[in-house]
Amino acid sequence: MRENSFWNLWPEIDNHTAAIKASRQGVLVASISCIFTTFIALITLVVSAPGFSLYSLVDAVVFGIIA
């Protein structure tokens, strides 16, 4: 086990099972980012809040593609 807790965020990949687990974690995080960004962008569009940009939806689409 590594001493620094920061490095625990980066999984060690030393076999096939660890690689699958790490890729699933990446898909999960990209999906959560996509959903959260889409939700916030649509909320700001509906309430006409300043700061809305179509780039927010483009960002959500990019994370959806990554996921």
Image: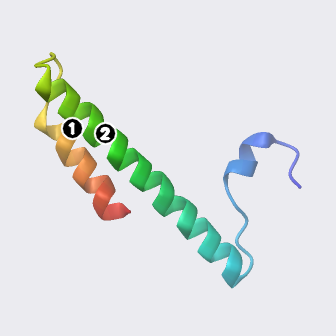
- Tag 2: amino acid: Thr
**Which residue is drawn at the image coordinates 73% and 65% (left, top)?**
12
- Tag 1: amino acid: Ser
Q: Nearer the viewer, residue 50 or 46?
A: 46
Q: Is residue 29 above or below residue 56?
A: below
**Residue at the farthest top position:** 50
Left or right of residue 50: residue 2: right
Identify the residue position indicated by label 1 in the image.
56
Residue 67 coordinates in the image, percent (x, y): 38, 63
Residue 28 coordinates in the image, percent (x, y): 49, 57
Q: Is residue 57 above or below residue 43?
A: below
Q: Is residue 4 above or below residue 28?
A: above
- Local secondary structure at mark 2: helix
Residue 16 sits in which quadrant?
Answer: bottom right
In primary-sequence order, the first of circles 1 and 2 is 2
**Which residue is drawn at the image coordinates 60% and 76% (left, top)?**
20
Identify the residue position indicated by label 2 in the image.
37
Left or right of residue 59: residue 53: left
Quadrant of the drawing holding the N terminus: bottom right
Q: Is residue 23 above or below residue 51?
A: below
Left or right of residue 22: residue 7: right
Residue 30 sits in which quadrant?
Answer: bottom left
Residue 3 coordinates in the image, percent (x, y): 88, 45
Left or right of residue 1: residue 26: left
Q: Does the residue at mark 1 contact the one at mark 2 (Cβ under 8 Å)? A: yes
- Local secondary structure at mark 1: helix
